[in-house]
Amino acid sequence: MTATKHLLQYVQEFFQDYLAAQRGLSANTVMAYRDALKLLLSFVCQRLSKPATKLELQSLQADIVLAFLDDLEKSRHNGTITRNHRLAALRTFFRYLAAEDPLHAGQYQRIVAIPLKRQPQSELVYLDVSEFKAVLDAIDRNRAAGRRDFALLSFLYNTGARVQEVCDLRVKDVRLAAPPLATLTGKGNKTRFVPLWSETATLLLAHIRERAINDQPDAWFFVNARGNQLSRFGVRHILRTRVEAAIARCPSLRGKPISPHTIRHTTAMHLLQSGVDLAVIKSWLGHVNFATTQEYVEIDLEMKRKALSTCQPAGSVKRLDRVIDQHRDVIKWLSSL
């Protein structure tokens, strides 16, 4: 078997067997690995003046990977975060090669040893309660699109869901009977259960009834104007449009870099400022480790001098104390299901 066939075979097995079958990664994660490897191999072909059919395993050396990473920043104008994401994906691929092709393990390990590039700590952006309430208040709920957007943003705030988790949400993933909850599928196809406030559950029930999808468990929960699954770009567009409409009544929104992930940060900060335990927030947001959750403590300097005593569902005057107390004890919560 030729070296070219070896490379192709390893690539195919990496994606078809290792990533999809053995690790069970989501389609989006697999596509991120694909993009990283595709960019690398295209760069190597160009650098060595070889067609892809002539590439060999010996061509994949640490120095050319380093040159590729530099090219991402210089030619493609990728930032440090994107560069590191590409490198992380490549590290996984070369770790796989080291296990499958021990004869060249040293070559692959040198690539795995390439360090991530340090990046300046970016400011974490989140909305305070009045800002998020202003966004919701600016939505015209007399229109169908407005009612959908109000339910969508309320769900994002209640659950702290990632944008893809909301896009992938189906009718069967939402239970509106007591106690209401949403089942979210996140990174690595990991699922978690997030309690819904009664106000959110009421909005979601009205949304289901308006779309007449009560008896369609596999239907997408949120769709675009054409009735298709709402995309990440679509959610960003909805949020951007609603924020722009709210700026007139809430000038502090102007100039803030607000994305769907900002709402996730907002949920975490409001829960933290309400006194919710970090372990609960970690579970609520689906963080893999405490380090990610701990960032909210380090960033919220205001909390160190004055903790907010309340955190309420936007648009409501009811306190969250009842919700927090109900779900602080995980065993009690599980027993209520």
Image (cartoon, helix red, strand yellow):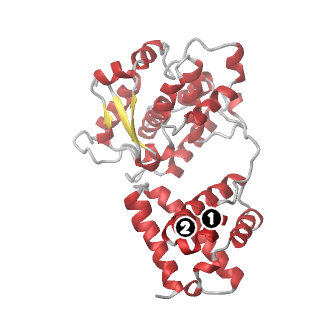
Amino acid bearing label 1: Gln
Q: Nearer the viewer, residue 252 or 179?
A: 179
How packed mark 2 is, by other alpha carbons closer than 10 Å (few <14, some 14-19, many 20 or more), is some
Q: Earlier in the sequence, mark 1 or mark 2?
A: 2
Figure check: 324 above or below 92: above
Residue at image point 72% right, 55% down: 79
Figure check: 28 above or below 279: below
Left or right: residue 234 compared with residue 327: right
Residue at image point 74% right, 70% down: 67
Residue 98 tag number: 2
Residue at image point 75% right, 68% down: 75
Total numbered circles: 2
Residue 175 tag number: none
Residue linked to disc 1: 109
Left or right: residue 320 compared with residue 265: left
Q: Which residue reaches farthest front?
A: 103
Figure check: 7 above or below 261: below
**Residue 296 appearing in the image:** yes
Give the CA separation, mark 1 to mark 2.
Answer: 7 Å
Q: Position of residue 221 (x, y in %)?
A: 36, 43
Left or right: residue 335 compared with residue 312: left
**Residue 211 appearing in the image:** no
Q: Nearer the viewer, residue 238 or 142?
A: 238
Q: Nearer the viewer, residue 131 or 287?
A: 287
Does the residue at mark 1 contact the one at mark 2 (Cβ under 8 Å)? yes
Give the quadrant of the C terminus. Answer: top left
Amino acid bearing label 2: Ala
Q: Position of residue 296 (x, y in %)?
A: 63, 29
Q: Position of residue 100 (x, y in %)?
A: 48, 69
